[in-house]
Structure formats: C-alpha cells, structure tokens
Amino acid sequence: QKEVEQDPGPLSVPEGAIVSLNCTYSNSAFQYFMWYRQYSRKGPELLMYTYSSGNKEDGRFTAQVDKSSKYISLFIRDSQPSDSATYLCAIPYYTGRRALTFGSGTRLQVQP
Amino acid sequence: GAVVSQHPSRVICKSGTSVKIECRSLDFQATTMFWYRQFPKQSLMLMATSNEGSKATYEQGVEKDKFLINHASLTLSTLTVTSAHPEDSSFYICSARKVGMGTDTQYFGPGTRLTVL
C-alpha cells in the first residue's frame, strides 16, 4: 500500500464550480499535511499547510484533515481557469526528516 | 511565503558530460534541502536529502557517485549529474526546508529540465 494515495484525475469543471480534491494516507502517525499546486513544467507551489485534524481556510481554498479516516481534502471555491494545474497532497516522509512523500497529483482543468 | 531559485532552468548536454544544478534559498536559511526528480505526468520522487555541513542522505536506488550533492552553505545546495546519459533526462526540482514559529515546511524551486543527447 502506498503511503499516500490520490486520484490522478483528470478532473474537469466549469468556471465557478466548487472543486474537491482528496487524498488518503496509511500511517496514523502523520501529523503535518500540505497541498501544493504545480503548473506544467514548474516547481510545486505551497498552497496550504495544516497540522493535525480540522479545517484551515485561506481565501478560496480550504484544507480539511480527518485523522480518524486518514483522509485529507482541498476545496476550491469559485474555481477559475487560472486554477488549472496539478494539485499534490504531501506528507512529511517520516519524523525528523521532513522530506515529503507526494500523492500522484490530480490534474484539474477549469473550463471558462 | 519564501523564495527558492534554481539555476539553470534548462540544460541540454551531450552524453558523458557532467551537469551542475544550483539551488538557493533567497530569503531564508535552510539547513536542509531536498532534491527530487520528476518524470512526465508522474509525481515527485525524492532522490536525496542535503544537509549543510554534512554528507547527503540518498534514497534507495539513487547512485551517490552519479548524483553528487554539496550543501556548501545555509542558502546553497548543488546537484551534479556526473557522466550524464540519456536516461538521466528528467525534471530536477529542489526544495528547502523552512522552520519557524509554528511552521515547518518546504518551498520548491522552479525546477531544472535536463536533456541528455
């Protein structure tokens, strides 16, 4: 079983839609969770960073962590064509190292 | 946020030559930097962890003599691909770990696309 599982998509939505992106993870000891956005041929850009369970909101983005089900989500409200990118969930590899293990990434296309 | 730069952004070289890629944290100090490799339509795969002032830690299957890493200062790590071959062609991305009050995360460089002919 992979440490982090993510549906690769692609996911296509109309402009203005609410987008839900999800990952599951296997190790209940994980505490930190991140979401990155990667445009084609660019490095990943940190979007959201959460610790433990709960919600965190930043503008149109909301990150949600449910540790009981080992499920993390990223919601994008009022999606824009500029949100079209690959979204990667990421979790620190293991305690102390802080290298990241990534989900496979979900490719999102927002249609104008 | 924080800014991490990489240089060069793109390099094309002949088989058998060596290529050096620089990763710099521009507005913070990073005792730890990471090097990743990404193939088309695939996720990032960790190659090695670079620690300032000490030897890098390589992931299983990554040849340390082929991918030389030097973390010369708190803002600079370099990856040298020695005797490059076409199978080394890939997108190489570095990240720098930023630790502060209530935060411990990584910021990525823009990546370097290596093409070995």
Image (cartoon, coloured by chain):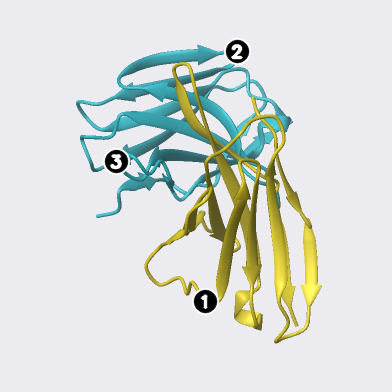
Chain colours: A cyan, B yellow
Disc number at residue A25?
Answer: 3
| Left or right placement of residue B12 versus residue B58 in this view | right
Q: Nearer the viewer, residue B115 or B73?
A: B73
Are discs 3 and 1 both within one chain? no
Q: Nearer the viewer, residue A37 or B27?
A: B27
Question: SS of the residue at dot 2?
Answer: loop
Q: Quadrant of the N terminus of chain A?
A: bottom left
On the image, the x and y values in percent for residue B84 come to 66, 80
Question: SS of the residue at dot 3?
Answer: strand
The chain that hosts pointer 2 is A
On the image, the x and y values in percent for residue A22 come to 40, 34
Q: Nearer the viewer, mark 3 or mark 1?
A: 1
Q: At 65% from the left edge and 29% from the top edge, which residue is drawn?
A: B2
The chain that hosts pointer 3 is A
Name the quadrant containing residue B12: bottom right
| Left or right placement of residue A72 versus residue A18 in this view | left
Q: Is residue A46 above or below residue A93?
A: above
Q: At 70% from the left edge and 29% from the top edge, which residue is drawn?
A: B27
The chain that hosts pointer 1 is B
Disc number at residue A28?
Answer: none
| Left or right placement of residue B49 versus residue B92 in this view | left
Name the quadrant containing residue A30: top left
Q: Amino acid at mark 2?
A: Gly
C-alpha separation, residue under disc 3 versus residue under disc 2: 26 Å
